Amino acid sequence: MFQNDWERDAWLMGDVYLRDYQEAESEADKRRTASLAISNYILAICERIGPDALTSALGTSPPETDTEARLNCLADRLNVFAPPSMGEDRLSLEALARELRAMAKGDKPQITEPAPFHGLKAPNAIRIAHHKLRALQWDAFLKSRGNRPADRHNAIASAYGEDWTTIYRWKPQVAAALGVTELDVGLDLASCTITPKNLVFPYETTAQAMSALEADGCAYRDERKRQFQVVEDTDRRAG
């Protein structure tokens, strides 16, 4: 017995993707369909336990300035969703949680050691690109729900603190930073109407969606501020 329609739809979509996985021939299709099946089953489980239990399981986020608490919090949350142990896989979620706990005590990163600097204009260009993709996804999502262009563009521009004439030009920037495939897939998922609850924007009411839009816009503005903080810190170290 399902708790609500959202849980039922997510579980049934998981079943659909699981059948697709069983019929898939290429490794790429197997990975894609298995991942989508698991994502939908997780969504169904979260619906079953409810937001209060989910919040209790994930715990309260500590201040980002508290490095030890922040890393341990991330490790705890990974363990909530980590699958059963697959043996000594150095890139499993279980291994990642162990690394985060070691880093919380001062170890240097191993499997999370960053790649060489990408050389893009901003030191956090990839993070900013993800925020810009999110804004474009909001437009695709709201359009798929029948919102008028002026209404959705004004709402997104207000949340992100940018003119819409600036935001709609973000597509080439996102494609350059993240790749055309990630851009296209992200927009396709955001505009999907196969199920009542969108996987990218799983909100049940307009109020929830608008609150999430405001939060996403705030996160973008905060990341823009971090960009300049990183530059200042780099300049100080160089000096």
Image: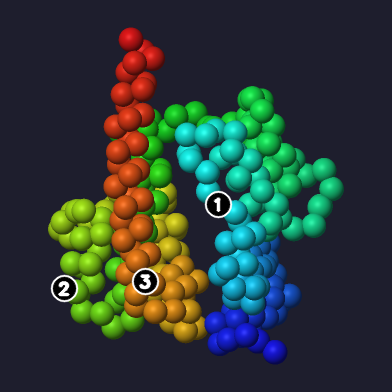
At label 2, which amino acid type do we have?
Answer: Ala
> Looking at this rendering, what residue extends furthest in the top direction?
239
Which residue is more in the foreground, 232 or 130?
232
| Coloration of the structure image | rainbow
The quadrant in which the N terminus is found is: bottom right
> Regarding mark 3 in the picture, which secondary structure is present there?
helix
> Regarding mark 2 in the picture, which secondary structure is present there?
helix
Residue 54 vs residue 175: left or right? right
At label 3, which amino acid type do we have?
Answer: Ala
Which residue is more in the foreground, 206 or 127?
206
Point 30% across, 38% down: residue: 225
Labels 2 & 1 near each other (Cβ < 8 A): no
Cα distance, mark 3 to mark 2?
17 Å
At label 1, which amino acid type do we have?
Answer: Thr
Which residue is more in the foreground, 20 or 238?
238
Earlier sequence position, callout 1 versus callout 3 = 1
Q: Dot 2: within a 10 Å radius of its alpha carbon, few (fewer than 14), some, or many (20 or more) residues?
A: few
Where does label 3 land, which residue?
Answer: 209
Cα distance, mark 1 to mark 3?
22 Å
Disc on res. 231 = none
Residue 174 coordinates in the image, percent (x, y): 34, 51
Disc on res. 150 = 2
Residue 195 coordinates in the image, percent (x, y): 50, 83
Residue 7 coordinates in the image, percent (x, y): 60, 81
Nearer the observer, disc 1 or disc 3?
A: 1
Disc on res. 60 = 1
Nearer the observer, disc 2 or disc 1?
A: 1
Which residue is more in the foreground, 200 or 98?
98
Residue 110 vs residue 224: left or right? right
* Number of numbered discs on residues: 3
Cα distance, mark 2 to mark 1?
37 Å
Q: Is residue 29 visible?
A: no
